Structures are given as C-alpha cells and as structure tokens.
Image: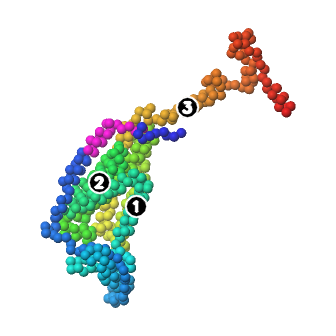
Amino acid sequence: MGAGHAHGASAPRSRRTMMASLAVLVPVAVVTLGALLWLWPDGRPGAGQGEGAQPSAVERLTGTVTAVTLKRCPAAPEGAPRPDPATCGTATVKLGEGRDAGRDVTLRLPGGPVAQHFAPGDGVILLRDADGAYQLSDHDRATPLWLFGLAFAAAVIAFGRWRGVTALIGLAVTFVLLLTFVIPGILEGRSPMLVAIVGAAAIMLTVLYLTHGFSLPTSMAVLGTLASLALTGALSYAALGFARLNGVTDDSALTLGMSLSIDTQGLLLAGIIIGALGVLDDVTVTQAVTVSELAHANPSYGFARLYQAAGRIGRAHIASVINTIILAYAGASLPLLLLFSIGEQPLGQVLTTPVIAQEIVRSVVGTLGLIAAVPITTALAALAATRHRPDADEAAPRHRAEPGDTEGASSRRRAGSEARRAGPGRPGSRREVSPSAAGEDFFAPHPSQDRDGSPGEEPEPRRAPDRPARHRRRAST
C-alpha cells in the first residue's frame, strides 16, 4: 500500500499565501537591486589610494625547473636555526611566458627553515621586477587546482544531476559578486557593513532561487534567512561594541586600516555576516523542505504537529552544526593556538586576547543566528503549508482508508470474499453453509419447480448426489 501522493496534486498553491510571500520578497528584491546598482564599484581609487597610484611593476610569470644544483649551506649564526640542505644551491628555470619565453635562467633557491623544495620538472612561479631581474617565488599550482575543480564539479553533477548544475551556477554567481562587488566596494572606501549586507542579500536571493527553484518552500527559506541574517547583524554590532573589538588582530587588518583607511570594525562585521550566510541558507532550506515533505506525507498534520516534527529535526541539525562551527574556527586558528600553548599563558589571558576574543564573538553570534533560524523558518513554512492545505478528498490517497475506518474496510473485504465464495446467482450472500446443509441443497427444488414437487414451466427430475458412485469407481480401480 503506497502513499500514492504527488507533490503537484497534494500541495496546490494558495493564491493568498503566494501573494503574501511576494508582498515581502518583491520589495526586498527591488531594494537589493537598487542598492547593488548604487554601491557598485566604479573603478575610482578609494580612500587612502592616491590619484596617481600606479600598479605594481613586478610581473608574475610561469616557468619549468630543468635542473637543480645543490651546494653546501653556509654556517648559521649561533642561536639561529640551521638551514635545510635541500634549499642551498641554484635552479635552472625555463621561462614559459613573457618577453624572454623559452630562455633558461639560473636562479638562487629560496632559503630559510620553511623554504619550499624544488626538483626538475616542477612548474614554478617567477617574479620579474622593473630592472628585468628574476626571482624564484613559488610552485605553480594551476594544474592541480583545475583538476580538483573538475573532480568537484563532476561529483556534484553526478550526484545532484540538474540540481547539481544549478548549484554550480549559484556558486559561480557567489564568486562573481564577491570578487566584483563586495571586495572592490570595500577597497573603494564604502561602508564594509553596508556592502556586506547588500552583497549577502543579492547572493541569497539569486542563489537560493537558482538552486532550488521558484517554489513556496524556497520562498519560506528566503524569508527565514533574511530574518535570521538581520538578527545576526544586530547581535554582531552589539557584541563587537560590548567586547570593545575593533577588528585589528593581525598585520593584514593593520595594513588595511592604515594604508587604505578602511573601517576595520565594519570589515569584521562584514566578515561575520557573509560567513553566517553560508550556514544559514543550509539550515533554512533544510527546515523549509522538511516541513513541506512532512505536509505531503501527512496531509492531516496541522500547524502544531508540523512545527513540532520539523523542530525536532532542526534541533538535531543545529546540534551538529554548532560543533562544526567551533571545529572550523579551531582548525583555522590552530597555529595561533599552538603559539599560545608554547607561551604557557594562563587560559584566562589567552581567551581575552583580541584574536581569540574575536573568534569567540564570531562563533557565539553565528550560533545564535543559526538557533534563531530554525524556529523562524519552521514556523513560516508550517504556516504556509497549512494555509494552502488541499481539500480532504484531494489530499487523502484514493486507495487509503481514513484513520479509524479499519473496521469498515475489513468488513468490506470480508463481504467481497464471501460474495466470491457464494458463486454466480447469489452475489453478496453471507449465509454460512455447513457440510450437512451442503448435502441437503442437492435435494432442494429447482428454480423451475414448485416447492410441493409439482412441475413448473421446465420440470426436471431430482437427482441424487453421485458421490457414492464416484467412491465405488475409485475403489474398483
């Protein structure tokens, strides 16, 4: 006994529900598009960048190592780390591009305790300055990264099929908006928080609908993400002010704040918002689709039962996501944690340092936004599912008995079986026939004969059962 339901038939769209969703989503989309056009970078130099600033004169080229000649390392000063013998010597590199393409140059291997090792056949990156001097910089990782990207795309498409293709397109849209709008907009001196909010809204509206289609569950996921993202932004703003964090925790932030006059606290807030979006859309889409599937599988569920059932799934999801967030931040800060461990500082002092305190605030605020996303999205999706509930006759499968009708279904099945046993001429008969009664039926009057034995229209002599005769024939054989 299958469920016998189809999404298109069991979940007709309610005009009122769709109009209510569009009444919120259309203004949000219009405002996002207007803000996107207003804040779009125009290529002008930002704050801290001189009008006559020139691009760097260093040229980045590729090449291939053809030979490596190792030499004896010089003696290290007392107290300094000993150099790696594999980094002492020269390398012959064949240039692959530039004005000297095809030419061989001999360069000194990069030295130092953590310098990379090079071998013949390695693809490398060279730096050429304005004077024409070359320097061996790094390995060329273009080919491995392209292979990783192709393997990733093939796996996504093989598993997700058309949904996987749309997910990859959404990923490309995310990268385009980050690289052409968010980063250049911040570098031009615009408010990092405003740029991040507009960029996150544009990414969310485009990617969610592109990946999951224009449907009611997707719309509920978008509304839940918007509400949770707004709450996350407000909590982040309050938490950074309360904890006195200005976003300057490393040399990169210090350089940006001094040379480009970028609001480092706003930059930290922008990073929290964009980072939270990456997990929020996962949670909201999961909750919206869960409620939709529960409504399809159980048409009798109301708002309360849908909310409770989907809420249990959401709590299990959040419990695992919280651990994921903490582990992700711990993994990214592992070298820093090792430095603190070597310094043998008390735990209280380590936790109050700006770097660790910033990650704690980021984790706590992101987790609070995720926790809020579950009830918000679940309530919106359950409300939408119950508002466009189909009629009982349409929602219930035609071959499935209603709850409480088991007795009636069983009696109907028994009646059908007894009718088949009754044979032709007596459909629906439910008279119990005993073996003795079966023998008497052979002597009952024929339908064409009266009960008193007088012939009717088609008299026919009564016949005794021939069971004894059959028995005699079997015995004789």
* Residue 84 visible in this rendered orientation of the protein: no
Q: Which residue is mark 1?
A: 152
| For marks 2 and 3 on the same chain, the one whose residue lies earlier in the sequence | 2
- Say how many tags the image has: 3
Which picture quadrant has residue 179? bottom left
- State whether residue 203 is above or below residue 475: below
> Viewer-proximal residue, 313 or 219?
219
**Three-letter code, disc 1:** Phe
C-alpha separation, residue under disc 1 versus residue under disc 2: 21 Å
From the top left corner, tell me how far across and down residue 223 is, in percent: 31, 47
Residue 461 numbered tag: none
C-alpha separation, residue under disc 1 versus residue under disc 3: 53 Å
In this picture, residue 241 sits left or right of residue 296:
left
From the top left corner, tell me how far across and down residue 418 is, in percent: 63, 28
- State whether residue 349 is above or below residue 109: above
Q: Which residue is mark 3?
A: 409
Is 19 covered by the magenta stretch? yes
**Three-letter code, disc 2:** Ile
Q: Which residue is mark 2?
A: 203
Residue farthest to the front, as pictured: 102
Q: Which residues are magenta?
A: 10-26
* Residue 448 visible in this rendered orientation of the protein: yes
Does the magenta stretch mainly form a helix, a strand or a loop? helix
**Three-letter code, disc 3:** Ala
Of discs 2 and 3, which sits in the foreground? 2
Q: Secondary structure at mark 1?
A: helix
